[in-house]
Image (tube, helix red, strand yellow):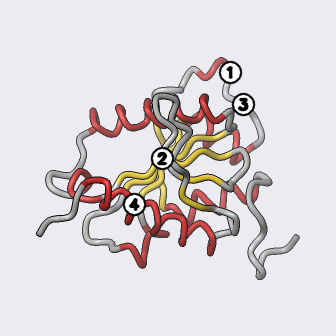
Amino acid sequence: MTARPKDIGTAAETAVVRALRRLGFPHAERRALAGAHDLGDVTGTPGVCWEVKGGQQTKHPRPSDLTVAQWMAETEAERINARADIGVLVIQRHGVGAANAHLWWAYMPTWQTAWVATGHLVADRQVGDIRARMLLADACTLLRAAGYGQPLPEEPR
């Protein structure tokens, strides 16, 4: 019996929530479906909207650049709906299971990545369609350094 798409989405979202809790977002939880004005897949992370993609759509074949661009547009719409500062698209990596969701890909528009990393907004969001890809753990490190989430116990406060 194959898993239903909703079950696959639930499993991927649950894996990301578990990783986020370990990575400085202790109040992260799956968001209930919001209908036409989706607010993202994870809540409890003020200022950050998370969209999670998992299952076959992320594996075989691996998502095309066009598919990732469409998912980024979806994430941006959800970020706006949620009135969040940052939108992060998390994609399950081929061969990397739920226990290692911290090693899944996290994408952010370059203007958001630059803003989180430096505190400076890129002029007029000129690079809005360029995306930065990093590990989910690294995205969380950048976000914590910018004041989102909570410091990890070993990080200086």
Q: Nearer the viewer, mark 2 or mark 1?
A: 2
Residue 10 circle label: 4
Mark with earlier residue (1, 4): 4
| Crowd tier of the residue under label 3, counting other residues whose Cα lies within 10 Å: few below 14, some 14–19, many 20 or above | few
Label 3 near label 2: C-beta < 8 Å? Answer: no
Mark with earlier residue (2, 3): 2
Please give the name of the residue rendered at 26% of the width and 54% of the height, measured from the top-left corner: 5
Alpha carbons under labels 4 and 3: distance apart: 34 Å
Q: Position of residue 13 (x, y in %)?
A: 45, 60
Q: Nearer the viewer, mark 2 or mark 3?
A: 2
The type of residue carrying mark 2 is: Glu
SS assignment at label 4: helix
SS assignment at label 1: helix
Label 4 near label 2: C-beta < 8 Å? Answer: no
Relative side of 49 to 149, left or right? left
- Badge 2 is on which residue? 51
Q: Position of residue 89 (x, y in %)?
A: 47, 47
User: Does residue 2 lie above or below 51 as drawn?
Assistant: below
Q: Nearer the viewer, mark 2 or mark 4?
A: 4
Between 153 and 55, the one nearer to me in the picture: 55
For the C terminus, give its image quadrant: bottom right
Please give the name of the residue rendered at 23% of the width and 41% of the height, measured from the top-left corner: 64
| Crowd tier of the residue under label 2, counting other residues whose Cα lies within 10 Å: few below 14, some 14–19, many 20 or above | many
- Badge 1 is on which residue? 123
Mark with earlier residue (2, 1): 2
Label 3 near label 4: C-beta < 8 Å? Answer: no
- Badge 3 is on which residue? 121
Q: Nearer the viewer, mark 1 or mark 4?
A: 4
Mark with earlier residue (4, 3): 4
Picture quadrant of residue 44: bottom right
Please give the name of the residue rendered at 42% of the width and 78% of the height, measured from the top-left corner: 99
